[in-house]
């Protein structure tokens, strides 16, 4: 991401399963993994807003906010919602 020129950094939409279940997005606190720290650093460096609020993966009693959506401008995405998976074989 450091190769992105500054004029392109203002219009970023980043979506994916980041597999960082220990991050608490309200306070940008994380577990001890390097992946957690790297993702928070990326979010801060590019001034990204994290738009998904809630659990996106459920397996048994375990719930995790794995799937995330980051934007540089709040107007890119006005609303998000988490829907139940279409089948029992899909967990997020």
Image: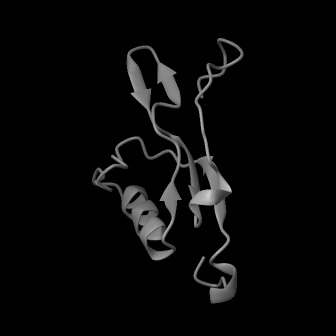
Q: Is residue 72 left or right of residue 4?
A: left
Residue 17, how many percent across, how many down? Answer: 59, 44
The C terminus appears in which quarter of the rendering?
Answer: top right
- Residue at 39% of width from left, 56% of height from top? 36
Quarter residue 88 falls in = top right
- Residue at 50% of width from left, 40% of height from top? 66
Quarter residue 81 falls in = top right
Q: Nearer the viewer, residue 24 or 88?
A: 24
Q: Is residue 37 left or right of residue 83?
A: left
Q: Nearer the viewer, residue 46 or 72?
A: 72
- Residue at 66% of width from left, 61% of height from top? 13
The N terminus appears in which quarter of the rendering?
Answer: bottom right
Residue 11, how many percent across, how many down? Answer: 68, 71
Residue 79, how many percent across, how many down? Answer: 61, 41
Residue 59, how many percent across, how many down? Answer: 48, 19
- Residue at 65% of width from left, 20% of height from top? 85
Q: Nearer the viewer, residue 62 or 71?
A: 71
Q: Is residue 55 above or below residue 7?
A: above
Q: Is residue 66 above or below residue 62?
A: below
Q: Is residue 87 above or below residue 14?
A: above
Q: How is the image coloured?
A: one colour
Q: Nearer the viewer, residue 46 or 41?
A: 46
Q: Is residue 15 above or below residue 2?
A: above
Q: How many numbered marks, from 0 up? A: 0
Q: Is residue 28 left or right of residue 66?
A: left
Quarter residue 87 falls in = top right
């Amino acid at each position: 991401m450091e190769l992105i020129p500054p004029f392109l950094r203002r219009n970023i939409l980043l979506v994916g399963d980041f597999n960082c279940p220990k991050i608490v997005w309200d306070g940008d606190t994380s577990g001890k993994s390097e992946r957690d720290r790297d993702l928070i650093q990326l979010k801060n460096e590019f001034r990204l807003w994290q738009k998904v609020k809630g659990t996106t993966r459920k397996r048994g009693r375990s719930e995790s906010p794995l799937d995330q959506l980051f934007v540089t401008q709040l107007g890119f995405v006005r609303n998000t919602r988490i829907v139940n998976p279409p089948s029992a074989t899909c967990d997020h």
